[in-house]
Amino acid sequence: MIKIIVALFFLLSPAFARADFKSSSSCKKCHEDIYQQWQSSMHANATLEKDPLFAGMYSWASQDGGNKLTDKCQDCHSPMSLVFHSTERGAICNSEGVTCQFCHGAEKINGFRSARDFQIDLSAIYGTTVDTANAAHPVEFRE
């Protein structure tokens, strides 16, 4: 049953092209202080490449349960893997952990159990203010 649900999720959720991915470093130009805070955060360092504890647990989980467990790990440690339907290690969309674009692209959140509860819209930037005159990107309101 879980395999059917996961398959439906991937089939029904929008697939974005890698060109739609905006690296968190692209936010740095205008948001230097926030970028520096993010870069040293657990969100930025949640990936296999940056967190040796997670890498060890991931390796153990893959030996014990194969992709069934490791796919669940990727959901939160590299949530853009869900957005781009890719668990490819080293791919730019998977190497930044929880990115600026993931959180600020969350159009809707349907609970808070995992990244699967987030509905992502990569064409918008959501924040707690409205700024439609911003030259770099308009900001749409979201609590």
Image (spheres, rainbow, N blue to C red):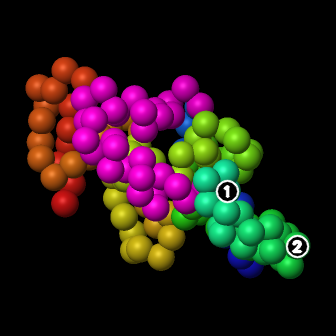
Residue under label 1, please give it: 48
Identify the residue shown where x is 33% and y is 32%. 28
Q: Which mark is residue 63?
A: 2
Magenta residues span 18-47
Say what amino acid the circle numbered 1 marks.
Leu
Near mark 2 (Cα within 10 A), the count class, few <14, some 14-19 or many ≥20, is few
Q: Which residue lies furthest to the top in this view?
A: 135
In this picture, residue 100 sits left or right of residue 139: right
Q: Which of 142 and 45 is in front in this view?
A: 45
Q: Which of 53 and 75 is in front in this view?
A: 53
Identify the residue shown where x is 34% and y is 58%. 108
36 above or below 11?
Answer: above
Say what amino acid the circle numbered 2 marks.
Gln
Q: Is residue 134 shown to the viewer in this render?
A: yes
The quarter of the displayed image where residue 27 is located: top left
In this picture, residue 88 sits left or right of residue 40: right
User: Any magenta on residue 34?
Assistant: yes
123 above or below 50?
Answer: above
State the image coordinates of residue 49 (x, y, percent, origin top left). 67, 51
The quarter of the displayed image where residue 136 is located: top left
State the image coordinates of residue 107 (x, y, percent, origin top left). 34, 52
